[in-house]
Image (cartoon, grey):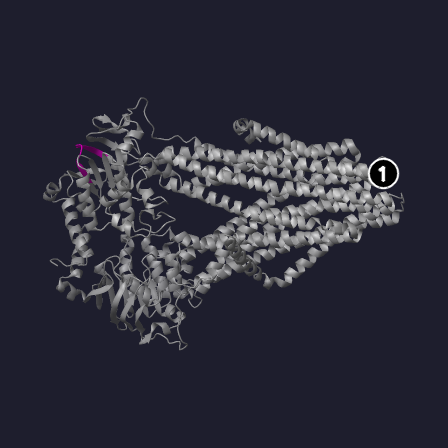
Amino acid sequence: MNIFRDLMWFFKMEKRNYITGVILLIFVSLLSLIPPYIVGIIIDRIQFRTLTIVSLVEWNLFIILLGAFLYIFRYIWRLKIFGSAMRLGRLLRNHLFEHFTALSPQFYHKQRIGDLMAHSTNDIQAVENTAGEGILTLVDSITMGSLVIITMASVISWKLTLISLLPMPVMAWLTHRYGDMIHERFFKAQEAFSSLNDKVQENISGVRVIKAFGQEEAEKEGFSRQSIDTVQKNIAVAKIDSLFDPTIQLIVGLSFFLAIGFGAMFVVKDELSIGELTSFTIYLGHLIWPMLAFGWLFNIVERGRASYDRIQALLHTKPEIVDKAHSLPRKPSGDVTYQIDSFTYPEKEHPALSNIHLTLKQGQTLGIVGRTGSGKTTLLRLLLREFDIKKGDITIDNITIYDYQLKKLRSTISYVPQDHFLFSASIEENISFAKPDATMKEIETVASIAAIHEDIMQFNDTYDTIVGERGVTLSGGQKQRISIARALLMNAEILILDDALSAVDAKTEEAILKSLQQNRKNKTTLIATHRLSAVQHADLILVLDNGNIIEKGTHEELMLQHGWYKEMYNRQQLESLVEQGGVQDE
Amino acid sequence: MNKELAVEAISQQKVFRRLLSYAKPHKKSLAIAFFVLLISAVADVLGPIIVKIFIDDYLTPQLFEWKPLLILGIGYISLHLLSVTLNFYQLFSFHKIALWIIHQLRMDVFGKVQHLGLAFFDKTPGGSLVSRITNDTESIKELYVSVLSTYVQNIIFLIGILTAMFILNPSLAILYLIIIPVILLLMKAYRHFSSKIFHLARQKLSQLNTKLNESLQGMNIIQAMGQQKRLQKEFGKINDDHYQANIKQIKINSLMVRPAVDFLYLLALTLILSFFGINSLNSPIEIGVLYAFINYLDRFFEPVNMMMFRLSQFQQAIVSAERVFGLLDEKEMAPVNEGDSYPTIEKGHIMFNNVTFSYDGTTNVLRNISFTAKPGETVALVGHTGSGKSSITNLLMRFYPITHGEILIDGVPLEKYANDELRKKIGLVLQDPFLFVGDVKQNIRLYNKEISDEDIIEAAKFVQADSFIQDLPQAYDEPIGERGATFSSGQRQLISFARTMAIQPKVLVLDEATASIDTETEEAIQTALEKMRKGRTTIAIAHRLSTIQDADLILVLHKGEIVERGTHQALIEKKGLYYNMYLLQQGMSKE
């Protein structure tokens, strides 16, 4: 139950709503005890023929009035308690989202997005449930249960109450047992369902093999077997599930039998009137719900506890990349210098980069080439402070980047990552992502520089075309170019292109690079690429291998060195020839 | 707008009717379950009548003879036990029937998917297909469980209660009938208002999840571009919309479900009390009947609450059913044989005659492809990515229908062959060897009963896979996990070779692996490939030109056309595209 203590901060925040809600809930329990009592009175008067038309009308009006109040109260407490629970969900979701935006890439490397989604949906829902249904069942089972029992015992007969409640603990025990059994069987049924899911998944992924070997019928048979297995495991669940209602029916029936049988005895002995006996049985009916609620309460609380702990753990994850105290609140600008002795990713043994020392003058272009995994991306990410260096430093304008405010540092850099991610929004919104108030003209200008404007005009909705997961499917090259346009709109001093043109054909690439040169005079550009032609015009080219610089210089210098660069360059020339289907001199 | 709603209602009715038709095969067990339900309801309804007899005939006049009382007591208890037992039986039966109905629906939709053409799979994301076969059918299950169990049961129960009321006091029962239209009206109104709000809430929830998912995926962009604050605001807005929709849902539920039904209950109570009270002023009435009526009233409203509660689930199930039926009605079927001549492939003579093909009907990926592979010959297809190599093999496997031209096998058009014949005589080896969960043996045999264990070992030996399989802890019974992740890519390749050779095909279609294969198995694979090709007509897609130097014919493809053709020697001498590709690869292998 200490989940309620952990959530106390929220209950305090929503004090008024919870207090009103709980009071009304108790009030509802109290008021709903009255009608059975009235029924008893009327029956007795009918029996003893003391009923008058006036009193009958009065009593009935009273019930209707009571009903109206109950209706209003029930409406209000639901709105107060369930509404508060929804506000808790909203609050936690906002907290989580804010926290997510502060966490560093390292966190996202360790966590799967699916898991994070599950925490933000299922877990928050479970906590919501605790703050809503949990409170309801807690209050209802305690107040309603005890009120009904007290009324039965004090107003009608404590002896009869004791006797007729005898079977109730059996019900609580049985439903608890069923709960355990069903939990176990349900788990198995879920497993069967998930392996059925796997089977379908495999079938769909292997559709070519299945068709090539004519295995369709056999697959159907296999699926049928698993589906039957799922059915059987679900039937096992249904068996227990179907026990709940009859069990409650059985126990309640026994309680009624005891109440009527012994009640009749008391009536004979004149300890009870028939009207009182009727009221008594109605009260008995009112006890079923609190009993059930009590069983549910444990379930709800248990789930809420686990979920709340998971959410708290997430919220307490510290972001690795933070501002230093007294960091500079201005945008960095000037020469970029790398002085890295070595950099190792967290939880890795081998350094990803070692001995990287270079200076890039303001306005120069740096080309970084090398095999996959040689450290190109790492070099760029360190400048963005996606990870912090321990041995060495990176400076801009001779001031270490760690002295600038993170926000300012990043506003100096436009970044086009390898995995060109677009949001499910219009092309216009995607391009203006970093600058939502950009004019259409600005957007079109950057789109033209990125050589995507004409492609966009071909779409039916031009710049309003929705892209991303739910929109039209773009080719990899189109996505990359939109992603470049998005970065260009920031008009930042430093532009990072991380293998950002891999899916663009050679001609387009050349056009983009040319217009970049024209439009980004006096601005620094860092390009990592597999295609050497993209960095041919760079002021400085680094060839990385295994985190070390193995060659360094301009294109002309490197071509004279007869090293990796030259060999690769020649090969790529031939490759592009083949790709164009061409033959030399054609 | 209203017209739209009406159309929607009609289509929902259609879907509902189609869903119910799935219950037909279970007519017999359904009838039994209904019958049991009926008896259980009768037994349950009789209980209060017994109490009524007890109160009116014995308790009120203070008449106590132990014999009839004992009979009444035993009668009550045994009726109760009977009702409880039968109730369990009917609940369980309806649940079971619902599960079997879903099984049938799943089989139908899965079976349908097996016979859809590859063109359909190309345009449909795998995830959504899986979701339709499993998740959507799962939410339809809820409909059967709630419709068959909750609704049917509760309606029968309500009818039982009303009947009992009629027996006890017809005039009051008639008065009581007024409540039913009120309840129906309430349900209708609730459905009307709630479906919109329910829909809104679901939509907001899905927007919320999409936004969150997307933000998490694009977090590095958000951070690099310093848009955290803006995204927080946007998320906050959607979160708030979601909250508002939920509050609306709480309001409508509070307004129209339990509190409203509880209010109706009290109204009905006053109705009964007034009726008896007024009657008692004129003549003595039976208290027992009053007791029974009040007792019935209590029981009457619980089912009503249950039915209201299930309404939203019902809506959800219909939406899922629409999606499932949409898939069941899909028209893009896999090509099948034409005519009923059922020719067989004896020699393996393959001829492409001016074949043109397009996946989408607009851009041709193959143009005027013509070539002949004589029995036992190897034809190699080379060209860079997107040149149309795979499309040629896709057509030969009859994965897609040809747009123009024809493919002849042994002089007979491809369309004339039965699927079985094609699958038995043409062996396909895919670039990415796909392994199924199971064991090695199963992966070689698949479900083909004609292949014996000896055949499996022989096939494995033939493709040089036997030695590494024998070294596995459980040899041919070694389990294979998801996608064969525990095996190296070379081993997976060899197993898939064995799978192809086990059916002893006349024609071999090879899609060579592009990914570099571990050196350990590389040699085994090359030897295996050579052996496999011997004596079989082979159409091979080659990425490494070194492996097809001995091919009888090499076709060089570019943008869907054959740009060069000839033997390795002839093409090298031509110094064209093939020659350049060859040079390129020579350079690569030096590295």
Return the residue nearer the eye: A525 or A110: A525
Most frequent secondary structure within the magenta stretch: strand
Q: Is residue A132 above or below residue B528?
A: above
Name the image quarter holding residue A289: top right
Residue type, numbered disc 1: Val
Chain under label 1? A
Number of residues whose C-alpha sits closer than 10 Å to that of mark 1, classed few (under 14), some (14–19) or many (20 or more): many
Q: Is residue A366 magenta?
A: yes
* Residue B217 visible to an observer of this rendering: yes
Q: Is residue B107 magenta?
A: no
In the displayed structure, does residue B15 sit left or right of residue B52?
Answer: left
In the displayed structure, does residue B486 sit left or right of residue A165?
Answer: left
Q: Position of residue B422 (x, y in %)?
A: 37, 70
In the displayed structure, does residue A72 sit left or right of residue B432?
Answer: right
Q: Is residue A157 above or below residue B462?
A: above
Return the residue nearer the eye: A150 or B444: A150
Name the image quarter holding residue A266: top right
Q: Position of residue B131 (x, y in %)?
A: 46, 53
Name the image quarter holding residue B552: bottom left
Q: Which residue is mark 1?
A: A267
- Residue range highlighted in magenta: A354-367
